[in-house]
Amino acid sequence: MLFKGTGTRSAGQLEQEIEDMGGHLNAYTSREQTTYYAKVLDKDVPRAMNVLADILQDSKLEDNRIERERSVILREMEEGQSEEVIFDHLHATAFQYTSLGRPILGSADNVKSITKKNLIDYIQKHYTASRMVITAAGAVKHDDIVQQAKELFKSLPTDPTTTNMLVAEQPAIFTGSEVRIIDDDMPLAQFAVAFNGASWTDPDSIALMVMQTMLGSWNKSAGGGKHMGSELVQRVAINDIAESIMAFNTNYKDTGLFGVYAVAKADCLDDLAFAIMQEMSKLSYRVTEEDVIRARNQLKSSIQLHLDGSTAVVEDIGRQQLIYGRRIPIPELFARIDAVDPSTIRRVANRFIFDQDIAIAAMGPIQSLPDYNWFRRRTYMLRY
């Protein structure tokens, strides 16, 4: 993310000002949201708000800074983590010809050709008051933040276009498909298998979170896999058929992805694929009360651990304000989790997994990974 020199400050002055506060300034972009945030002492909150307002409304976009960030992004693309690459490919094949199928960093050609005018046009089109929230957590007073926001962010464009309008214009349509990149020089194979999931506001999104926890995650360095509650993790650890495995449930404005990502040796892929598909499809048939209780408790514990600290809290508030238009209290969220029972899991699995198309992304020495039809056939089982 590019930190720009602003109308009253150069980029160097801005960085110096934040350092003098003993603060921290950062920004990141996900597939749906861009976040700018500052961490400062309570007495410096007004100054930090002023810096953020200056960045978002009065950026100089100096040519030398653009060129520097261009080289940084290109280097990040070359050094991208293999897990990120797999999920980029997964989105590209699952949401073909839609904006959700494009990588967060964009293509190398776009990064090389982007101009100052492109950035200005983007800011004027997308950094609008109707699509922005200002949140704060920690040693702050709500009324003070509201007043500062009114004074400092009054120059934001007031284009009434909302995210719902943009999504309706270009919906993310799931396509059952696969992409495979064979590279025998890689020491390990990795692949992700995903079903079309739920949006943030879908009533079944909470059940999918519980199902993700039921499938679990594990890697060899963590140990203890043979004694974990997840049957999938137990099978993987006992039979030593993967280096790591991770269930994922990614929600977006109008859709989602639910599945499993795994890293394994080339000669383990057949057994690993069978274990993954059997455990996922089994959610439609055989779910015990004990497994659901364990998953609910683990999920609530992980949420509490995640919301430890003002940074995680303020990000959570901002995301929920953009998605739901309000903050969901923790007791309400936990009540929704506790309402998930085995019958709910089976119903939701029948909706999202049973006999549904899948998307697959695989990379490395993957010749022994079963073909697409093999995976598609195992989205249901007749012997249960």
Image: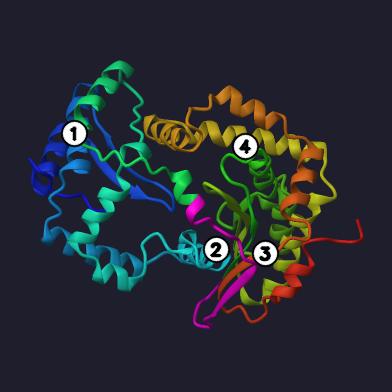
Residue 270 image point, x, y percent: 72, 73
Q: Secondary structure at mark 2?
A: loop
Location of residue 190 in the rendering, given as x and y in whole percent from the top left corner: 57, 69
Q: CA distance from mark 4 to mark 2?
A: 28 Å
Residue displayed at 24% across by 22% down: 42
Residue at far right of view: 383
In the picture, which quadrant includes the C terminus?
A: bottom right
- Residue of label 2: 95
Which residue is identified by label 4? 299
Question: CB of mark 4 within 8 Å of CB of mark 2?
Answer: no
Given this view, does label 1 or label 2 mark the residue nearer the observer? 2
Q: Where residue 63 sits in the image (x, y, percent)?
A: 12, 61
Q: Which numbered disc flags the more N-terminal residue, 3 or 1?
A: 1
Please give the residue where the numbered disc 3 appears in the rendered image. Answer: 358
Q: Residues within 10 Å of mark 2 (few under 14, many from 20)?
A: many
Whole-angstrom CA distance, mark 4 to mark 3, is: 25 Å
Q: Residues in magenta?
A: 168-189
Name which of mark 1 and mark 4 comes first in the sequence.
1
Could you tell whether 209 is left or right of 374 in the image? left
Q: Is residue 133 left or right of residue 250?
A: left
